[in-house]
Amino acid sequence: MRQLNEVQHKSMVSDTDKLLRLATELTAEINSTNPTSLNSDQLRKIAEIEKLARSVKDKMRISLKGAPGYMDAIPQGPSPYSRH
């Protein structure tokens, strides 16, 4: 079970690294061109960013049988960043 968790963790790290790279590239491209219109390559990157973000989110929610999920370790309740 530990090996499966490690494999899943490595996959999430890889996806997150790729997500960051794509977002950084997209931001640079948009800043260097016309920010009011997007070309097909930029739209493709946006779609890939969305897909990777969903994938990471889903992987974080998945828990292996008998092991707590990644999201289970996050305390519930009001966010320390929310206004009271």
Image (cartoon, rainbow, N blue to C red):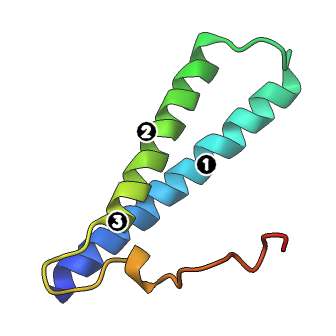
Q: Check the image and report above or below for 25 versus 14.
A: above
Mark 2 residue type = Lys
Q: Position of residue 80 (x, y in %)?
A: 75, 80
Q: Position of residue 28 (x, y in %)?
A: 79, 36
Tell me the residue that label 2 is attached to.
51
Instruction: Indicate the quadrant containing the N terminus: top left, top right, bottom left or bottom right.
Output: bottom left
Residue under the image location 28 percent in, 69 percent down: 8
Q: Position of residue 74 (x, y in %)?
A: 50, 81
In this rendered view, identify the residue nearer to me: 14 or 84: 84
**Does residue 79 appear left or right of residue 55 in this picture?**
right
Q: Looking at this view, name the residue that lies furthest to the front.
A: 84
Q: CA distance from mark 1 to mark 2?
A: 14 Å
The quadrant holding residue 5 is bottom left
Residue under the image location 42 percent in, 74 percent down: 71
Circle 3: element type: helix
Q: Check the image and report above or below for 19 versus 33.
A: below
Residue under the image location 69 percent in, 34 percent down: 26
Q: Residues within 10 Å of mark 1 (few under 14, many from 20)?
A: few
Q: Check the image and report above or below for 38 versus 56.
A: above
Mark 3 residue type = Arg
How many discs mark residues in the rendered view? 3
The quadrant holding residue 3 is bottom left
Mark 1 residue type = Arg
Q: CA distance from mark 1 to mark 3?
A: 23 Å
Tell me the residue that label 3 is attached to.
61
Circle 2: element type: helix
Tell me which label, 2 or 3, sits earlier in the chain: 2
**Does residue 84 appear left or right of residue 11 in this picture?**
right
Q: CA distance from mark 2 to mark 3?
A: 16 Å
Tell me which label, 1 or 3, sits earlier in the chain: 1
Residue 21 - label = 1
- Mark in the foreground, 2 or 3: 3
